[in-house]
Amino acid sequence: MKLNSAERALMNNPVRALVQRHYEAPLLRRLGGGCEGAEAIEIGCGRGVGTEIAMEVLGAKSVLALDLDAEMVDLARSRLARFGDRVVVRAGDACEIPAGDNSADVVFDFGIVHHIPDWRRAVSEVARVLRPGGTFYFEEVTRHALERWAYRRFLAHPEFDRFDARQFVAAVEDAGIEVGGRWVTRIFGDFFIGAGKAN
Ligand SMILES: C[S@@+](CC[C@H](N)C(=O)[O-])C[C@H]1O[C@@H](n2cnc3c(N)ncnc32)[C@H](O)[C@@H]1O
């Protein structure tokens, strides 16, 4: 699902970018290690901040950045142009990642999978494209958050088959990506962050 205007404003603002860079990226590194020299994919790249962090903070060599929304793709293209051909931004669905089997060292999910009605399919796509030993970094929003008044009133999300952290981690592990204890919840269980390694 594309974002509505309220969530677009929530996502595309400097406070979120600062939190991603200075809080989430170090936490992802602690949970999953860095990704120096990695060929990475970011699903649902939005305006491109996650890809910037993958390149500048976590050390990826290249990123294929995908988003369903053409406006987001344009924003990300402008933001990431300085990386030249190390970053390719294109329209793409996380449920049909345009990459081969076992072709990526790393996949990033910065708050996108909870937007996907068939989210288990996106998880299986992540598992398909990751090489054995590759890392899936995720930052997600739980159904507890999506059930809160403000989320229901102002934001638009799939209504059914929402997940909590344990359900998400279980689906990731069922798809062949081992997470174990490498995940944490934050803000009364509304968010969780973690990393898994592909078998
Ligand atoms: C909450 S925003 C997060 C954007 C960005 N990752 C960030 O952290 O700022 C979710 C993004 O996922 C995109 N999206 C939603 N469903 C998608 C899908 N099936 N495949 C690819 N992108 C999708 C939306 O267009 C939106 O840009």
Image (cartoon, rainbow, N blue to C red):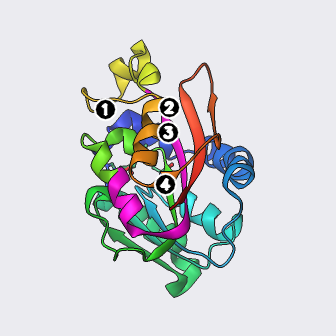
Q: CA distance from mark 2 to mark 3?
A: 8 Å
Tell me the residue at 39%/68% (across/down).
129
Q: Is disc 2 in contact with disc 3, using a CB cutoff of under 8 Å?
A: yes
Q: Amino acid at mark 3?
A: Glu
Q: Amino acid at mark 4?
A: Ile
Q: Which residue is mark 3?
A: 140
Labels 3, 1: front one = 3
- Crowding at dot 4, Cα within 10 Å, few <14 / some 14-19 / many 20+, comes out as many
Tell me the residue at 40%/55% (across/down).
44
Q: Which residue is mark 1?
A: 157
> Looking at the image, which is closer to me, 178 or 101?
178
Quadrant of image for the N terminus: top left
> Looking at the image, which is closer to me, 198 or 70?
198
Mark 4 and mark 2 lie on one chain; the one further toward the N terminus is 2
Q: CA distance from mark 2 to mark 1?
A: 17 Å
Q: Amino acid at mark 2?
A: Ala
The spot of residue 73 in percent (x, y) is 37, 64
